[in-house]
Image (spheres, helix red, strand yellow):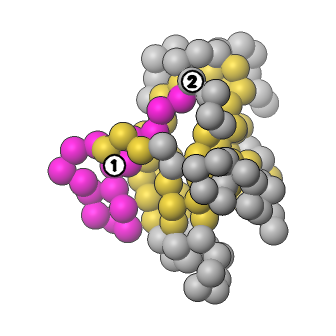
């Protein structure tokens, strides 16, 4: 399996201090068993808030530890990282954050030098 974001393998997104970033995610894998479960590493200083699921906005942002997208599923997420560094949003099998597809999608870098 290979996870791509906008056609890029393991892209990085640069954040400045106290910036929120909005991620619009789509699970474009086919097959009813190809669930995409995304989470930051347990020690990452990042928070995720769900804004919308399948195009339906929630009444208020909801703090979540991960995002689970079925095939064709969509999610709008707000991400904030409180410390500088490279933080990985990875595929997971469950709350243990063991890699399922072996992918990172995307990497969020806060502070430091530009990544391009």
Looking at the image, the residue that sits furthest to the front is 96
- Across and down, in percent, residue 34 comes to 64, 76
- Looking at the image, which residue is at 51% across and 61% down? 68
Magenta span contains residue 114: no
Rendered image quadrant of residue 3: bottom right
Between label 2 and label 1, give the one nearer the viewer. 2
Q: How many numbered discs? A: 2
Magenta span contains residue 60: yes
- Looking at the image, which residue is at 36% across and 62% down? 53
- Looking at the image, which residue is at 33% across and 49% down? 51
Q: Which mark is residue 45?
A: 2
Q: Which mark is residue 51?
A: 1
Q: Which mark is residue 85?
A: none
Task: State the SS at label 1.
Answer: strand
Query: Quick one: 21 or 71, which is closer to the camera?
Result: 71
Q: Earlier in the sequence, mark 2 or mark 1?
A: 2
Residue 13 visible in the current orientation: no
Magenta stretch?
46-61
Q: Quadrant location of the N terminus?
A: bottom right
Q: Quadrant location of the C terminus?
A: top right
């Amino acid at each position: 399996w290979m996870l791509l974001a906008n056609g890029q393998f393991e892209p990085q997104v640069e954040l400045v201090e106290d910036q929120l970033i909005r991620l619009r995610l789509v699970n474009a894998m086919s097959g009813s068993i190809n669930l995409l479960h995304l989470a930051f590493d347990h020690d990452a200083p990042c928070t995720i808030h769900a804004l919308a699921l399948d195009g339906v906005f929630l009444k208020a942002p909801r703090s979540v530890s991960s995002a689970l997208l079925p095939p064709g599923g969509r999610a709008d997420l707000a991400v904030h990282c409180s410390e500088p560094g490279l933080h990985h949003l990875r595929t997971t099998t469950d709350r243990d954050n063991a890699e399922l597809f072996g992918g990172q999608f995307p990497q969020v870098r806060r502070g430091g030098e530009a990544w391009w």
